[in-house]
Image: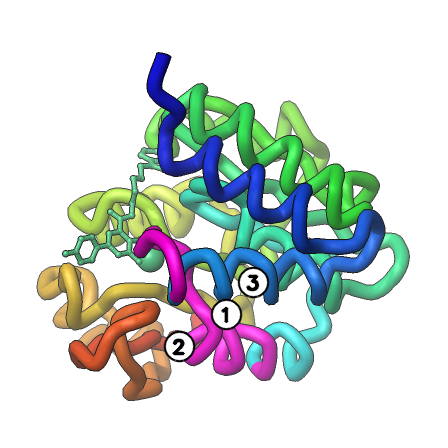
């Protein structure tokens, strides 16, 4: 039977990356996606912007919406302080199964809690299920038409505090126009656009960083 792209990506990690070395896992995935098959990881160019935001925020609690194969999960987890927690949500069970193995290969499983399900169902349960009061950083990288409703849901559930950072991928390509309009016009957010490119291509894309003002 045919393998899937995530399965082939995992194979490239197991072949080319060193167990327990998150940076080598990131490099192996980027090499696979540049040389073999494109895949929707945040990628190396936007990944550097992600790294700088994570390092600046130095978060104790992180929520990632959209795990896919775990590329950004590994990038973020490798930069977290010792007792920090990263909760990552993945809707597709096949993607989640691959991501668990990529995360384990990188040796960051102790910092990561991968949850399978839909953001609309899980966001209201974050506090009771994981004991998280608020998130210091949220990385939005799931269905592009869910960025806005889920941001409003996080506000309603009290998961954002004064200073919480939202970092959104793909605000240009595929695009999240309603989300961009909201965070850029709302008096409750201070937003900044980081111009970049769609992973592994020359197409414009970028990350939007928005600080919740409370
Ligand atoms: O679609 C994308 N990502 C989302 C995956 C599903 O996410 C579903 N999903 C994951 C948790 C989760 C929780 N609740 C609901 C849905 C939930 C995505 C797409 C592209 C892209 C750009 C140009 C193209 F020509 C084709 C594709 C690039 C990206 O960087 C992306 O991130
Ligand atoms: Mg993305």
- First in residue order: circle 2 vs circle 3: 3
Q: How many numbered marks appear?
A: 3
* Residue 71 visible in the displayed image: yes
50 falls in the magenta region: yes
Q: Position of residue 89 (x, y in %)?
A: 49, 36
Q: Position of residue 187 (x, y in %)?
A: 27, 78
Q: Mark 2 — residue?
A: 209
- Mark 1–mark 2 CB contact (< 8 Å): yes
Left/right of residue 2 with respect to residue 55 in the rendered view: left
Tell me the element at label 3: strand
Q: Which residues are magenta?
A: 35-52
Using a 10 Å C-alpha cutoff, classify the residue at mark 3 as few (fewer than 14 neighbours), some (14 to 19) or many (20 or more). many
- What's the CA distance linking mark 1 and mark 3? 5 Å
Q: Mark 3 — residue?
A: 137
Using a 10 Å C-alpha cutoff, classify the residue at mark 2 as few (fewer than 14 neighbours), some (14 to 19) or many (20 or more). many
Q: Residue furthest right?
A: 82
Q: Mark 1 — residue?
A: 165
* Residue 136 visible in the displayed image: no
Identify the residue at image location x=16%, y=47%: 145
Query: Which is nearer the eye, 153 or 95?
Result: 95
Query: Which is nearer the eye, 131 or 67?
Result: 67
Q: Position of residue 92 (x, y in %)?
A: 38, 25
* Quarter of the rendered image showing ligand 2: bottom left
- What's the CA distance linking mark 1 and mark 2? 7 Å
Identify the residue at image location x=37%, y=55%: 36
Tell me the element at label 1: strand
Identify the residue at image location x=64%, y=24%: 129
- Mark 1–mark 3 CB contact (< 8 Å): yes
- First in residue order: circle 1 vs circle 2: 1
Left/right of residue 68 with respect to residue 125 in the rendered view: left
Q: Quadrant of residue 128?
A: top right
């Amino acid at each position: 039977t045919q393998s899937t792209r995530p399965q082939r990506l995992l194979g490239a990690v197991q072949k080319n990356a060193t167990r327990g070395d998150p940076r080598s896992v990131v490099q192996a995935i980027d090499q696979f996606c540049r040389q073999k098959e494109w895949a929707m990881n945040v990628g190396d160019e936007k990944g550097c912007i992600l790294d700088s935001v994570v390092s600046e925020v130095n978060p104790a609690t992180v929520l990632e919406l959209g795990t896919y194969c775990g590329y950004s999960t590994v990038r973020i987890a490798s930069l977290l302080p010792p007792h920090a927690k990263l909760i990552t949500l993945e809707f597709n069970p096949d993607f989640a199964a691959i991501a668990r193995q990529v995360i384990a290969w990188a040796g960051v499983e102790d910092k990561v809690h991968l949850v399978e399900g839909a953001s609309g169902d899980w966001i209201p349960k974050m506090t009771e299920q994981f004991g998280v009061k608020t998130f210091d950083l949220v990385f939005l990288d799931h269905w592009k038409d869910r960025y806005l409703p889920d941001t409003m849901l996080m506000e309603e559930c009290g998961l954002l505090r004064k200073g919480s950072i939202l970092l959104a991928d793909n605000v240009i390509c595929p695009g999240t126009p309603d989300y961009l309009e909201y965070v850029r016009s709302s008096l409750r957010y201070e937003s900044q656009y980081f111009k970049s490119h769609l992973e592994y291509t020359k197409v414009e894309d970028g990350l939007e960083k928005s600080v919740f003002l409370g």
